[in-house]
Image (cartoon, rainbow, N blue to C red):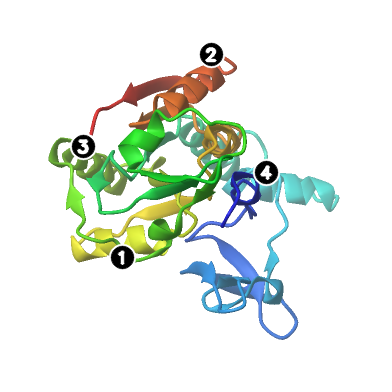
């Protein structure tokens, strides 16, 4: 039986699919991250190899042409003159970068789709009960409760999309494909993202799935806040859990400059 406190201890790494890391014998070969998962030992893997076989690229202050200008200054070289084409290109690129980044976030269970799965609860008195995701979303924890999410570690059983919300997801994905600076993420409380990703692949969609491995709203809040600090100034969030909605609304009050649409939906 898995206790809630055990589930909350998720490991977060600052790497996403599409990022570039350093690997190879001397960890100096640039490798694009195509897959993040776990092996039979439970170790985190990148492209099927253990995480420890890679290292993260060191961060460079600035982006693109600005990084080049700063690097020249650091080396003691004369940077491009303000009237030069290189400097003008850097200014133009900087303005484009600062135009804004939009992040669209969707919960999965009972937001985008339903599936036959239960959360099993062993109560302090020894009795056991079970809830579906919609019931669990409004369930109030009781002292001594122990949770078992085993159904959510399997491939989806009898999944069905919630059409009106699924259409919104597809619309956001299409916008992201056409517009730089837009990203769509499925942010799920599940421990494993693969079953969700596989389900979308059967529908012809390749989506980015982030499992936070917890029903604690703070886990989603922490992930979103990291993205805001990373430069996203517009956030769209959809979830069927009132607890998650309240937590994200509270977060947004900390960042009044961030445009946001936080939508509580009824699956």
What separation in Å lies between label 3 and label 1 (alpha carbons)? 19 Å
**Mark identifier at residue 165:** 3
**Mark identifier at residue 80:** 4
What separation in Å lies between label 2 and label 1 (alpha carbons)? 37 Å
Q: Is residue 50 left or right of residue 206?
A: right
Q: Residue at x 65, y 71 (%)?
A: 51
Describe the element under mark 2 as helix, strand or loop.
loop
User: Residue 201, percent across and down?
Assistant: 25, 64
Number of labels in the image equals 4
**Counting residues from the N terminus, which is met first, the one under dot 3 or under dot 1?**
3
Reading the image, the residue beneath label 1 is 198
User: Residue 52, percent across and down?
Assistant: 71, 73
Reading the image, the residue beneath label 2 is 256
Mark 2 and 1 residues: CB-CB less than 8 Å, in contact? no
User: Residue 13, percent across and down?
Assistant: 64, 55
**Counting residues from the N terminus, which is met first, the one under dot 1 or under dot 4?**
4
């Amino acid at each position: 039986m898995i206790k809630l406190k055990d589930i909350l201890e998720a490991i977060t790494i600052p790497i996403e699919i599409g990022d570039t890391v350093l690997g190879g014998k001397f960890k100096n070969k640039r490798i694009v991250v195509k897959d993040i998962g776990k092996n039979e030992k439970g170790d985190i893997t990148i492209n099927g190899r253990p995480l420890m076989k890679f290292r993260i690229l060191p961060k460079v202050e600035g982006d693109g042409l600005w990084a080049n200008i700063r690097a020249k200054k650091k080396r003691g070289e004369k940077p491009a003159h303000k009237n030069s084409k290189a400097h003008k290109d850097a200014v133009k690129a900087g303005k484009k970068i600062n135009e804004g980044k939009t992040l669209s976030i969707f919960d999965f269970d009972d937001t985008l789709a339903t599936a036959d799965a239960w959360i099993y609860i062993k109560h302090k008195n020894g009795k056991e009960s079970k809830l579906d995701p919609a019931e669990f979303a409004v369930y109030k924890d009781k002292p001594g409760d122990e949770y078992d999410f085993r159904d959510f570690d399997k491939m989806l059983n009898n999944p069905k999309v919630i059409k009106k919300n699924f259409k919104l997801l597809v619309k956001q994905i299409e916008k992201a494909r056409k517009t730089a600076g837009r990203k769509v993420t499925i942010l799920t409380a599940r421990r494993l993202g693969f079953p969700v990703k596989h389900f979308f692949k059967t529908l012809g969609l390749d989506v980015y799935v982030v499992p936070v491995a917890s029903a604690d709203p703070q886990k989603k809040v922490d992930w979103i806040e990291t993205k805001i600090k990373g430069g996203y100034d517009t956030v769209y969030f959809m979830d069927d859990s009132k607890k998650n909605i309240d937590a994200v609304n509270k977060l947004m009050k900390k960042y009044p400059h961030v445009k946001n649409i936080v939508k509580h939906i009824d699956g």
